[in-house]
Amino acid sequence: MQTHDIRKRFLDHFIKAGHTEVPSASLLLDDPNLLFVNAGMVPFKPYFLGEQTPPYARATSVQKCVRTLDIDEVGITTRHNTFFQMAGNFSFGDYFKREAINFAWTLLTNSVEDGGYGIDPQKLWPTVYLDDDEAEAIWRDEIGVPAERIQRRGLKDNYWSMGVPGPCGPCSEIFYDRGPEYGIEGGPEADEDRYIEIWNLVFMQNVRGPGGGKDNYEILGPLPKKNIDTGMGVERVACILQGVDNVYETDLLKPIIDLAAELTGRSYGAGSHADDVRFRVIADHARTSAMLIGDGVLPGNDGRGYVLRRLLRRVVRSMRLLGAGDNQATMGTIIGKVIDLMAPSYPELETKRADIVKVAVGEETSFAKTLAAGSKLFADAATATRKSASTTITGADAFTLHDTYGFPIDLTLEMAAEAGLEVDQEGFTALMAEQKQRAKADATARKTGHADLSVYRDFLDRGPTEFTGFDELVSEARVLGLVADGARVPVATAGQELTVVLNRTPLYAESGGQMADVGTITTGSGVRLSVTDVQKLGKSVWLHKVRVDEGEIEEGDEVLAAVDTAWRHGATQGHSGTHMVHAALREVLGPGATQAGSLNRPGYLRFDFNASGPVTESQRREIEEIANAAVEANYQVNTFETGLNEAKAMGAMALFGENYGDVVRVVEIGGPFSMELCGGTHVVSSSQIGPITLIGESSVGSGVRRVEAYVGMDSFRFLSKERALLAGLASSLKVPSEEVPGRVEQLVTKLRDAEKELARVRAEQAQAAVSGLLDTATTVGSTLVVEGRVPGLDANGLRSVVTDLRGRVADRQAVIALFSPSGDGPDAKVPFVIATTPAARDAGIKAGDLVKEVAPLVGGRGGGKPDLAQGSGTEPGGIDAALSRIREFVG
């Protein structure tokens, strides 16, 4: 049964049962908690939360979903996908458990002729929540499932909530038994590889309290109305009904793999795991990319745009690695195939075909240039790394790839891993920080474009721009002037970048550490300008840096200036969070921790302060706790204007580097908790800041320290990653999370002991090898040549052995040349050391000259002094030739 038919049968089944069909919502719903829609119930959240009244009692949909947490796992296994379809049926205070179970069972088990899926009922295993006797009775007594095929499971598996206080309830999941060839018997409790979940029925009947995790919260009581929320995995059902092992072999993904195979000349499933991973990456990412572009996402450097860019670039690179030529454009063909496959269910893809393909091809063209330059630089860096006997690409090389060639750091990490190398991420991060500091130092020059500021004299003489952004985010305004390339212009057209001066504006101009707002300037006639930056001139005139997107703007036009609301929300979180951190710092470190600089942008803040030494870990935890306690206290944020002296008398703190007039603006959070002179934008109450997470503390100069923090959703995402990391460690170490530090310490101790023991054994082996090498030494002419291979030694160990050997033959004309090969293929290393005795040097035999002779023969380089020199190569097969060359040289 084809996937499109599976979707249609699902919808038809529930429409026949009185449900209203609701088309799939966009992947980009306005939900501050989500980057993309990631579950079928997301569009219905306002109804379940009681925020809106549903227009129907029953609904059904097949919702397109994207989950991006596992991008790096896609292709490596067959379990991970970024795009999937979730079919669901929903009841808002109408039917409940009995009907939901019957609806699911009849669709799954009815014959194909009767509109069902025709699945053998003997292969289906329901699960229910621990104490859900009602659901179990329905399955057993009404549906007829034997009791031994019904399993009870706990909160983690069979109880659902949104992760926050609100609606929740027990689940009943339906699993399909794929057969003994896929695992052991015993139902889902025994093996979820053999028994795969295909449908989850959520009986939303309770209200949960606060708490973390899937089982760390209290059930507070029943909901006023009981609701139903179910989700059937369309792709999983397709695997079953099409008789294939995984989603990549179904009718909507296998043709993409087949096309990629045709374009590259490689075969899927031919025995190369690496190739199979790349084929799966292409199929998954191409489909997700087409769906995202169709919903309006464009490639970019952050947020949703960055996710799309990363997906598209992984497709391009995978095609190249499979054999597509550097100049072979394949994205248009691949994306076109995706549209062919998906359009029967999502006809808007066909309508937008040209635009979707254009965006994808444009990114391919752009990335081809990046790959051409960056891949060569990466290869050079990797070669140099191996030749230096290292396994870590320097932070400087990674930074050059990023800064000069636009190579994303995650791609560098991925390519390094494939090459068996690592990347100095700390070094890369430090260089990025230095670049940002340099950028800030010349920000004023860049933002005025080195223009002659006399062009703005007229605006300064007219008086200040009226800033309306404290009270509104959209303001009517008039264009006072347009400035392009340092000169006034009467009109600007689409594509131009210039500066616009308005008589009034809601857009915040960068100052006090707060970055400028972004937004738009529009007219009723369809003119649209994107505002990318706002700067102050003489602290009074706002200069809007804009790009004309549509139409033609003229001096004197009446316009609407609007702030990007999401940007402003994040900016207020960052700025108010800065005040909270400042107050907490002073409480923990004392009044001497005064501000020495700050920067805040949506989701992030950094704060420089005077300090005599580093902040300890315990102080850092205390600062974080105090700041977050103030967030939780939900303090009101009050702003008012008063005289400078009066403000100082009230205890208001002044911002770093600001010159204040007689009248100042005071921002007060929680009465005495925080009171500062500030002209920035802020939240209404402290709880709107969201969690504050300190992510770093460092020195930025003599007597000045810096803390950095995330706020709001950026803080949550950071903590989520940290939690996932800890959970992964706990799982790998098989200990509870709280025991991870102690367990890691034990392992580190064991590793150090093992390394010491290994070093001791190697030293003994090396000493044993010394005598053997002297026994097998040969005399060439007048020179004793001690040569050979001593595996298992690094450069330092090898040098120690060579020095020891030279000491034993110091009274003779001798050359000692030892090689220590390790690894094979691209991971091969050949460090080598050559030493000479005084008599050999008197005869004109110098170690440095010998190294230069033999290094190319082992694929490396080296150098040194006449008495001792060393090098490293990557070709063990050249050692015999190198030893032969040494004998020729001394002879």
Image (tube, helix red, strand yellow):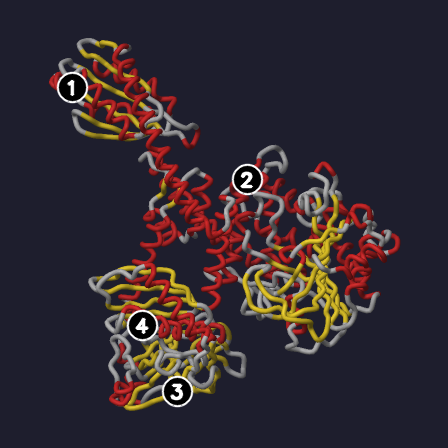
Kind of element beneath mark 4: helix
Q: Are marks 3 and 4 in contact (CB under 8 Å)?
A: no
Please name the residue that numbered disc 3 is placed on.
503
Kind of element beneath mark 1: loop
Indicate the position of residue 239 as horizontal and vertical percent values: 72, 47
Name the N-terminal-most of marks 4 and 1: 4
Please name the residue that numbered disc 2 is placed on.
322
Foreground mark, 1 or 3? 1
Label 2 crowd bin: few (<14), some (14–19), many (20+), radius 10 Å: many
Foreground mark, 4 or 2? 4
Foreground mark, 4 or 1? 4
Please name the residue that numbered disc 4 is placed on.
587
Q: Are marks 4 and 1 in contact (CB under 8 Å)?
A: no
Indicate the position of residue 101 as horizontal and vertical percent values: 79, 60
Quick check: 845 above or below 44? Answer: above
Please name the residue that numbered disc 1 is placed on.
837
Label 3 crowd bin: few (<14), some (14–19), many (20+), radius 10 Å: some
Quick check: 105 above or below 693? Answer: above
Label 1 crowd bin: few (<14), some (14–19), many (20+), radius 10 Å: many
300 vs 816, left or right, is right
Q: Are marks 1 and 2 in contact (CB under 8 Å)?
A: no
Foreground mark, 3 or 4? 4
Q: Which mark is residue 672?
A: none
Q: What's under tag 4, amino acid-wise?
A: Glu
Q: What's under tag 2, amino acid-wise?
A: Leu
Q: In this view of the protein, which residue sits in the foreground, 174 or 480?
A: 174
Marks 3 and 4, how far apart at CA: 43 Å
Indicate the position of residue 49 as horizontal and vertical percent values: 64, 73
Marks 4 and 2, how far apart at CA: 59 Å
Marks 3 and 2, how far apart at CA: 58 Å
Name the N-terminal-most of marks 3 and 2: 2
